Image (spheres, grey):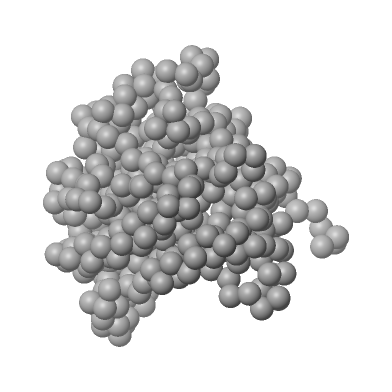
């Protein structure tokens, strides 16, 4: 590509750190090794049948074939409001406090275009889902990283944020249950975020993609459950992980109406909303008795137990997560996240994500996704026991 110069902003994208792993994966595969991929955070289980059936009927209806509303169907936004009320006890006005997204990644990536001016500063966790940093960067802003460490329970330490940085910050991204650390946050932490953001006039942006993927009866809270949250913040949610619908692209942002209006203004000029048939299927998902979600959690919980108990038995330093489909494991002494990931790929044909690839503070850890059947996890453990 030398007939044109790509946009300067593309040069600002941090180096892609998984290249080495990707190449090694191809080499190992070429040797004929049956690779066990614990790298991808994409459910292997299908979307529940009743949702697929609803989609099948909706797609037959020509009324769904036209341009959707960029902000989403009222039908879907009302279902989101009902679901938030039922699940979290949070009241939302479906007109002004809910917006449909083409997957939450779309909304997260577009939000900074609506709230950040060039050179603005956003507070972004490290390690983290990369989109907070990328969205900030594409909007011409900068990220100030908040390290998530084992010592602070993988929660940003708000008291350690320099007051001048806090003064300059426009938004703060945070995500619980957390990808990649699988940490959870309680309402007390959310309350601290509200106070911190109110004091420093920061927009709180919570990514709640994993609230429905929890174990042992634990029910992760919504950020909007704490008093004052809606005055200063929004929450992103998604049907992707809850209903195994990653390919469908359906999510929502809820909360502060002015922040949502800014996001909506960007969206109305960029996309034309989510396919109505998908939103109709989404209504069926949100209005259902949620037994499909419980079934899903049972499967993932069993995999979690097999993996974590097995890893512990092999002497690895790892905690059992309360939520998400990730296991965040410290690498053995003397190794880096990259060298350990290379080692298990080379020696055991297992793909794990090196923590450094998700942020500086992810060094020393690897992420494993519980998105393969239990039998494959058992096989992975057997292989690990031999290296
Ligand atoms: C998977 C994931 C999402 C959801 O993305 P969609 O675009 O809704 O599919 C959002 N945030 C985090 C942290 C995730 O891991």
Q: How many marks?
A: 0
- 309 versus 331 height, above or below: below
Residue farthest to the right, as pictured = 2
- 363 versus 243 height, above or below: above
Return the x and y of residue 299 as percentages of the image width and height. Answer: 30, 65
The residue that appears at 26% across and 52% down in the rendered structure is 215
Return the x and y of residue 329 as percentages of the image width and height. Answer: 48, 46
Residue toward you, 379 or 215 = 379
Residue farthest to the top, as pictured = 163
Q: Is residue 160 left or right of residue 345?
A: left
Return the x and y of residue 336 as percentages of the image width and height. Answer: 64, 43
Return the x and y of residue 379 as percentages of the image width and height. Answer: 48, 69
Quadrant (top left/top right/bottom left/bottom right) for the N terminus: bottom right
Residue toward you, 233 or 331 = 331
Residue toward you, 38 or 223 = 38
The residue that appears at 38% across and 54% down in the rendered structure is 309
Q: Quadrant of residue 59?
A: bottom left
Q: Quadrant of residue 288?
A: bottom left
- 207 versus 42 height, above or below: above
Residue toward you, 52 or 23 = 23
Residue farthest to the bottom, as pictured = 60
């Amino acid at each position: 590509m030398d007939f044109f110069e790509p946009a300067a902003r593309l040069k600002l994208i941090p180096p892609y750190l998984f290249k080495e792993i990707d190449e090694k994966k191809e080499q190992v595969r070429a040797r004929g090794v049956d690779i066990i991929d614990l790298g991808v955070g994409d459910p292997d289980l299908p979307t529940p049948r009743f949702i697929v059936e609803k989609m099948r009927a909706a797609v037959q209806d020509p009324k769904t074939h036209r341009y959707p509303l960029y902000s989403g169907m009222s039908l879907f936004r009302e279902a989101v409001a009902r679901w938030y009320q039922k699940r979290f006890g949070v009241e939302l006005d479906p007109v002004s406090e809910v917006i449909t997204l083409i997957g939450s990644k779309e909304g997260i990536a577009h939000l900074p275009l609506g709230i950040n001016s060039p050179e603005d500063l956003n507070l972004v966790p490290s390690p983290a889902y990369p989109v907070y940093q990328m969205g900030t960067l594409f909007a011409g802003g900068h990220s100030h990283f908040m390290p998530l460490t084992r010592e602070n329970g993988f929660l940003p330490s708000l008291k350690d944020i320099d007051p001048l940085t806090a003064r300059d910050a426009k938004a703060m991204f945070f995500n619980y249950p957390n990808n990649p650390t699988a940490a959870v946050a309680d309402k007390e932490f959310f309350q601290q975020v509200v106070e911190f953001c109110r004091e420093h006039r920061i927009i709180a942006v919570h990514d709640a993609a994993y609230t429905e993927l929890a174990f042992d009866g634990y029910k992760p809270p919504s950020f909007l459950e704490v008093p004052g949250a809606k005055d200063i913040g929004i929450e992103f949610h998604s049907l992707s992980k809850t209903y195994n619908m990653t390919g469908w692209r359906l999510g929502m942002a809820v909360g502060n109406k002015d922040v949502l209006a800014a996001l909506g203004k960007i969206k109305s000029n960029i996309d034309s909303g989510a396919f109505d048939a998908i939103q109709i299927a989404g209504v069926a998902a949100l209005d259902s008795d949620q037994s499909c979600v419980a079934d899903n959690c049972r499967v993932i919980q069993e995999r979690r137990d097999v993996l974590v108990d097995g890893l512990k038995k092999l002497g690895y330093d790892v905690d059992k997560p309360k939520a998400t489909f990730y296991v965040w494991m410290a690498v053995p002494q003397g190794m880096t996240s990259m060298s350990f990931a290379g080692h298990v790929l080379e020696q055991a044909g297992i793909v794990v994500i090196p923590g450094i690839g998700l942020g500086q503070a992810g060094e020393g850890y690897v992420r494993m996704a519980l998105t393969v059947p239990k039998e494959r996890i058992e096989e992975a453990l057997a292989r690990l026991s031999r290296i």
